[in-house]
Image (cartoon, rainbow, N blue to C red):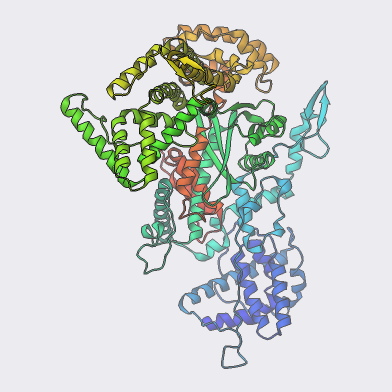
Amino acid sequence: MFFFCRQFVNCNFSLFAIANLDSASAVGDSTLRRFVLSSYVRRSTAHQSDTRRSVAHCSARRVLNVDSVVCRSIVAPPTSLPAARGPAAPARLSAATSPIHCSRSTADSVHFVRDQKVIIWLFQQVQIMERFFKPKRFREGSSNDPNINEVVEIQSHVELDLNDIVSDPGLRKSIEEFDISIRDQVRREYLTRGPCKPIGHMYPKRSFGGRYKEDAFVKNGFINRKNALERFNLHNGAVDSCHNHARVQVESFQDQRHSVSNILRAHGRDIEVSYRIRLTAMLDVTRFLLKQGLSFRGHDESSNSLNRGNFLDGNNQMISPAIQKDLTRACASEITLSIIEDIGNNVFSLMVDESRDISVKEQMRVVLRYVNKRGQVIERFLAIVHVSDTSSRSLKDAIDALFAKHGLSLSRLRGQGYDGASNMRGEFNGLKSLILQENPYASYIHCFSHQLQLVIIAVAKSNLNASDFFNYVTMIVNTTGASCKRRDQLRQIEHDRIVVMLEGGDISTGSGKNQETNLVRPGDTRWGSHYLRLGRLLSMWPSVIQVLENICDDSSSFDSRGVAKSLIQKMENYEFVFMLHLMKMILGMTNELSLVLQQKDQNIVQAISLIESVKDQFQIFREDGWHTIIDKVNTFCELNEIPVPEMKDNCMIGGRSRRRRQVITNLHYYRVEIFYQVVDSVIQEMNTHFSEVGTELLSCIACLHPRNSFSEFNVQKLVRLCDLYPEDFSTNDCIVIEQQLQNFIHNIRQDPNFFGIEDLGSFAQKIVETQKNQAYPLVYRLIEMTLVLPVATASVERVFSAMKTIKTDLRNRMGDEWMNCLVVYIEKDIFSTIENEQILQRFQKMKSRRMQLPPLSYPTIT
């Protein structure tokens, strides 16, 4: 039977295979068309020369270049084998190469259905026989019989590059430019992304009643907009119009379950259940690996390997790397879609930063900040994009492409948050300026946390005493932790000292107290770590001194002995102890502010309040803090037997020759030359870097702070705030909101639900809970505009930390397509809410799968 089917195919398909290509195209199955043409090509090449073979292959390639149209009807196979088509078949060869027409005569329709049944029946028979017979394949010239030459088809595998999928219709590649084998995949990728609105395109405007309106997106424009519905109906047309034909074809193309290829496989219910179980098990393994940030592949994935990778050890079905990538993309796409749906049509802010990964590639991280339907401030990681360079124009183009891909509009952007790099905050050509040129309402906020770090850096570098102090502290930490032996020695000495103090009753025990610790190395960009280092140096002072003494006595290197001796002399100096306590107190006052600014739900009103509070603390510390710090320093020196100088004695200022030195008292030196200079420098830098706090925008926003029953509430400033956003508040809204603000503040002060609320974020959530956002919509919109403004880019920095966890030295060749797993690794709370069925359905729609699973119908609870 197998031989008969093959001979029938080879003998008869050479006559009418191309004639029936229109039938194969009409049913829209690429596998079926490939089967028809492969039979034709094998038969034609068996008796022709090499030149004729290439011509036949090229002809078949051109015929294959037909767009797929999926047949929505199920065609039953014939009950018996039909006879050969006879003389009528060659007559239809010439008509087969013409384009497929929508209308057919009655006779052509009969031949069309019959040809279709013949092809489907033969395809089924060959598939059945190939399950039991696997013929040997010989390369040309390898057989002993010179008359037998079977051509081995070599098909090139072409993969789809997602960079070729451009959302903007004006920039898309034509479907004919893609390889024939991936065109269906291209179509499915576009259908999955959905419609695209050309964002950033400047449409022509027309004057209507003295005001300019955007023209309609049609060729000639609309003059009478009242007839717009008639124009839309005219565009839709009748049942057989081009619009309806295109709509039916798209719906049929998306319905893979009723395609011919899926019907020919004739999968039963049991096979579908088994396939769903295997696919769900594989998805569970994928979920676990993505949440933990573990690698999928192994170095050796052979069957006799002891470690074939995390994915293969947890699963033994459907182990193709392409399937792994598709599942990862499906998970990441569902999370991104959930974020975009949560944003909806609300306003949002953009936070961007760029850095190099482990493979020295510039990666741009994008985080969005918005207010959800419950009034909560949310910061979500959107995507990581590889950029060729870090110029502002390249970053802007990458953001535009990302917004167009996800259907986000730049017109809804109300805030920008970057660091202080020139390519970000440049006044003329920075990324901030390029966005402001398109959207003047996207206010730029320099990252508050970054500015706070710049304050400490400026103080440490501008003051000679502070700079010299931090250099010596770094040398102490490096010397005591230069080797494992010294670290263990320091840890053991500190342990013995704590035991003695516990036995003597000097310290108490308790949960979390007296933990094993060591000196930490500070980060280059995280000055909050310096506060922890100075605190540990103070608490471990005797142990550090003893380790340095051991190095000075026992080290075999004279250089190490000399360094240790000079460090001991420096640590036992009163000036070093004074600077240690002073810098610890300054960093302690800014440490709490730094930690608060890095919270995701922090708002601009609360940040302004905290910054003003820190400024006041520094001013109070300058006026009244001298006696406090001098008492702490003297007490510490007495406990550690460090000589305390008399403040009335004279001293000579260092850094000059002995002849030119200025003689002053110790009190003047420590109080004026060190204390006042360092504190004044901090206050000056705080006023310089946080100068935008006094801008009109932020001063108006500060009136919304709910502390002390809205004691700073100012109606006139809030009305002025509405004037700064004409896109969100019309002229009529600015008139109405004045009275609405007065009604709102009177109602809030009388409502006991709002008593004791000191944070604007909690206040917004309480407004949504009590449904006052519906009673005062303009006031809530004003609060929402305030909460959207970014405070710090800590969320973007966390993305970089996650990227270093995922893309390590062992995985430095990870491609950009695998970086999508960062969305799953970071946004785990969203990932946990997404059902498996959603991911499986997206996985099914990404490509033409061998088996199509129907969506699960969950029973309704009554």
Extreme residue toward the bottom, this view: 145
Between residues 443 and 523, which one lies in front from this camera angle?
523
Where is residue 603 shown, x and y percent of the image? 51, 23
Give how far across and how far down residue 440 sits, in percent. Answer: 69, 26
Identify the residue at image location x=50%, y=7%. 711
Viewport quadrant of the C terminus: top left
Q: Where 729 sits versus 230, above or below?
A: above
Q: Position of residue 130 (x, y in %)?
A: 50, 76
Nearer-the-camera pick, 665 or 186: 665
| 789, 248: nearer the viewer | 789
Examine the rendered structure and indicate whether residue 844 appears above or below residue 639. Answer: below
Left or right: where does residue 629 sit relative to residue 428?
left
Q: Is residue 270 left or right of residue 110?
A: left
- On the picture, is 92 further left or further right than 602? right
Q: Residue at x 45, y 44 (%)?
A: 825
Q: Residue furthest front?
A: 659
Q: Is residue 777 visible?
A: yes
Residue 522: percent from left, percent from top: 43, 36
Q: Is any part of residue 84 visible from this angle?
A: no
